[in-house]
Image (cartoon, rainbow, N blue to C red):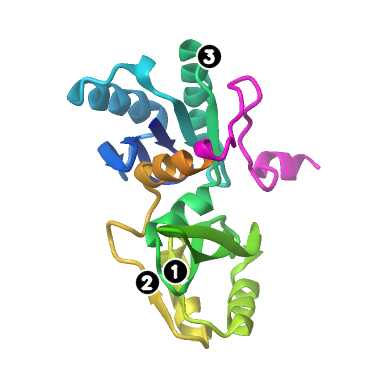
Amino acid sequence: MKILGLDSSGLVAGVAVVENDVLLAEYTTDYKKTHSQTLLPMLDELRNMIELDMETLDAIAVASGPGSFTGLRIGSATAKGLGFALKKPLVEVPTLEGLAWNMWGTSRLVCPLMDARRNQVYTAVYEFVAEGEGCRLQSVVPQRPMDIAELIEELNGLNREVVFLGDGVPVYLDRIREQTAVPYSLAPSGSNRQRAACIAALGAVYFAQGRTVSAADHKPEYLRKSQAEQESL
């Protein structure tokens, strides 16, 4: 099984290829350029580096949201274009699940945070449940936009140790430190941002479960209206 993973849902842009249980290649950037400038060149570089025949892909996994409206559109358009051209199915991997996959196997609760501005985050809470030779990702608090204070109050009520990760952590770190009453930790660099490798790896799990969509049917999951749409109401 060979899965291409794409993630441009936040500040990070990344592409990766996973074959069976091996990460063949990953290209990640977190820099000032827009994802429209980086995603396809990164994919082309990765393809050349590992001599990837795109026809050998089984599916294209894409971070499906929530996240940046522009970033999600770029990732979605890229995935759809590849899906149409290659006649391959798409696997929609929720961005927050992909982020949580960085912490695979931990016994702590995992709380990914993506900055949604105005004291809000896109967030969810997950746990890993042992299953066979591995783990299954299970939702404890479903994904939604939340006020950071409301989220911390909910985490305090769960009364379990938690690990935070995502680009929302540095934005709300003072609030986390002041208000979190349960033991917590912060994921280190290398595992505290979106990774296309996690999108590809989790995409492989979902592909094996038959959770695919056609390129025509794929749509990003924004979770809320854009700023322009809200201001037009």
Asked whether residue 154 is in view, the answer is yes
- State the residue position of label 3: 84
Instruction: Say which amino acid is labelled 1.
Output: Phe
Assess whether residue 213 is covered by the magenta stretch.
Answer: yes
Residue found at the very far right of the displayed protein: 233
Which residue appears at 56% of the width and 57% of the height? 117
**Please, what is the dominant secondary structure of the magenta stretch?**
loop
- State the residue position of label 2: 186
Residue found at the very far front of the displayed protein: 132
At mark 1, the secondary structure is strand
Q: Work out which quarter of the rendered image holds the N terminus and state it.
A: top left
Instruction: Say which amino acid is labelled 2.
Output: Leu
Provide the residue span drawn in magenta: 207-233
* Position of residue 233 measured from the top left corner of the image (x, y, whole percent): 81, 42
Which residue appears at 45% of the width and 54% of the height? 99
Q: Quadrant of residue 133?
A: bottom left
Could you give the CA–CA distance between mark 3 and mark 2, rounded to whole angstroms?
40 Å
Q: Nearer the N terminus, badge 1 or badge 2?
A: 1
Mark 3, mark 1: which one is toward the viewer?
3
Up-down relation of residue 37 to residue 26 (above or below): above
Asked whether residue 73 is in view, the answer is no
